[in-house]
Image (cartoon, grey):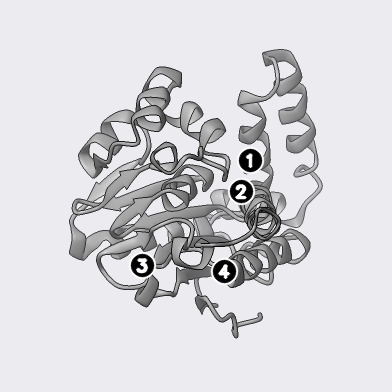
Amino acid sequence: MKNDYETLKLDFTEDDGVLVVTMNRPHAANSMNTQMGADMRDLWSGFYVDQQGVNCIILTGAGNKIFCAGGDLKQRNNMTDEEWQQQHALFEQAVWAMMECPIPIIAAVNGAAFGGGCEFAVAVDFAYAARSARFALTEVTLGLLPGAMGTQNLPRAAGVRRAKEIILTGAPFTAEQALEWGVINKLCDDDTLMEEALATARRIAANAPLAVRQAKKSIAMATQLDLKAGYAYELEAYNRLVPTEDRLEGVRAFNEKRKPNFKGK
């Protein structure tokens, strides 16, 4: 697995199949510069091709105060329109690749998640947050609007009316409000956030990898298809698992009252 990204730190535990990806620009509030856009695009799209033994991923930020501050506005200062749009094209591809990653991704929001950082929290499969975390989509205060799927993913997480309030005011909100509104799944004490995220990631990673990936794909269709078409997609995903070795192993292990040994085959 590639582990020489300039802006991302990767920690993989082969025994449990969990990868921790840390946005690693603490000197710049873990903000997204052009290099991070390229690094993320490469990382997430690589897993679409080859999962490399990774069964669950945690995305977090370096340090204990900031998850991600969004786009690096210092780098963007005085960019030409063409340079801005070229950089944003990287971000667009990166967030698409993140959402299409077949491996479940959990955000461990360890601090401020503003702009693109907040968008990441709703682009991943689900998120846990520290009590001290704060969230905001401040783009309208800068003459922009969320451009990393925020106007699409936030309404799906929090509802259309709440998303309008968050996006149109640009006002920050607390981790407690994020939990109440459906932006995050769980509120954790600051010093137990990673421990709790890792426990969930390990539980997911211990399940049959092919089944988890097929389930993730099928769930993603729930908001995109009508019920009948969605069920047809679910059955197609289900039937691809019937002839797998993991399905046979899972049933055998249940009957033999032992822990299954899944191979992802």
Q: Mark on residue 157?
A: none
CA–CA distance in space, label 2 to label 4: 28 Å
The local secondary structure at tag 4 comes to helix
- Amino acid under disc 3: Ala
Question: Does the CB distance between marks 4 and 3 fall below 8 Å?
Answer: no
Q: Of circles 1 and 3, which is in front?
A: 3
Alpha-carbon distance for marks 1 and 3? 34 Å
Q: What x and y, as percent, mark residue 184?
A: 36, 41
Residues at badges 1 and 2 in contact (C-beta under 8 Å)?
yes
Q: Picture coordinates of residue 253 (x, y %)?
A: 58, 55
Mark number displayed over residue 36: 4
Residue 61 lies in quadrant: bottom left
Any mark on residue 212, and which?
Answer: 2
Q: Quadrant of the C terminus?
A: bottom right
Q: Residue at x 43, y 74 (%)?
A: 25
| Rendered position, 120 above or below 61 | above
Q: Which residue is mark 3?
A: 29
Residue at screen point 80% across, 32% down: 236
